[in-house]
Amino acid sequence: MSNQTSLEVSGVSKIYPNGYEALADVSFNMQQGEFICIIGRSGAGKSTLLRCINGLHPVTRGSIRIQGTEITSLPDEEKLAIRRRIGFIFQEFNLVGRLSVMHNVLSGRLGYMNGFHSVIGYFSQEHRQKALECLGRVHMLHRATYRADNISGGEKQRVAIARALAQEPLLLLADEPVASLDPDLTWGIMEDLRSVAREEHVPTLVNIHDLETAKAFADRIIGIARGRILYDGPPSGLTTELLREIYRSDDPNRRSRYELVS
Ligand SMILES: Nc1ncnc2c1ncn2[C@@H]1O[C@H](COP(=O)(O)OP(=O)(O)OP(=O)(O)O)[C@@H](O)[C@H]1O
Ligand SMILES: [Mg+2]
């Protein structure tokens, strides 16, 4: 089971309607439970990659398989069914502030409910039980009845992780999940994400700006620059040379700190 390929991205290119090529021939695989951090400077294509994987953006070329199913050519209805099994965690949490924490997590169950029940917002005992388990998984049971806009940023991100877990995800994608949090919280959230990936066997892909955090947590790091993968390997293999290239700016007035150290 641990060697099963969960995600296969192969030769993916993404050209936006304005002609900008944000991804160029991107290929990599992920196994069950793998925790990968994607690094790269602003504009490198990190968010574009996650949006292509969850089907939010159509790819221009290439193939994306999730547990063997090619998702780029699926009819809309089947694409939606797969999307419901992809947990997406955002920098700004994207909770519904006026709803309780519990309701936010229950919304992760919508893909498992019949149309009528989801329209009237009826959640069976089984769904409630699952939502509570997910909240417990990230130590947030004591906040279940709070309004989502009354909890702290770190708590919101834990609730967002619980909501993603309630989807029983095949894959977890997190786009800068710690960029709005202070450094102490950052490590707690990264630890939660990594333990969920490992213990629930969910492959998890995290876009992250902070290199030190990426190196501290990732099983594997993918370094992207100008839409291309420049590095794919263990954190220990990232040399200063590679980092310079990954973070190299085309603008001489906006050198990265890796270009400035000699
Ligand atoms: N809808 C769009 N249309 C045209 N170009 C776009 C679109 N969305 C993104 N881009 C461009 O594609 C490139 C990659 O953007 P993307 O958001 O994937 O970068 P990123 O690595 O996530 O950056 P950041 O670290 O700032 O979040 C950027 O140059 C961006 O301006
Ligand atoms: Mg981004």
Image (tube, rainbow, N blue to C red):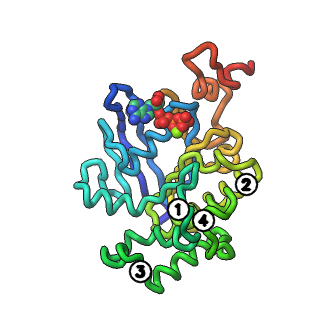
**In the displayed structure, does residue 140 sit left or right of residue 32?**
right
Q: Is residue 75 above or below residue 127?
A: above
Alpha carbon separation for disc pair 3 and 4: 19 Å
Q: Earlier in the sequence, mark 1 or mark 3?
A: 1
Q: Secondary structure at mark 1?
A: loop
Location of residue 19 in the rendering, given as x and y in whole percent from the top left corner? 33, 25
Label 2 – label 3 distance at C-alpha: 34 Å
Q: Callout 4, which amino acid?
A: Ala
Q: Residue furthest top?
A: 252
Q: Earlier in the sequence, mark 2 or mark 3?
A: 3
In space, the residues marked 2 and 4 are separated at their CA atoms by 18 Å
User: Mark 1–mark 4 contact, CB under 8 Å?
Assistant: yes
CB at disc 4 and ligand 2 closer than 8 Å? no
Q: Residue furthest left?
A: 75
Given the image, on which type of amino acid does mark 2 rest?
Answer: Leu
Foreground: disc 2 or disc 3: 3
Which residue matches tag 3? 122
> Disc number at residue 148?
4
Q: Secondary structure at mark 3?
A: loop
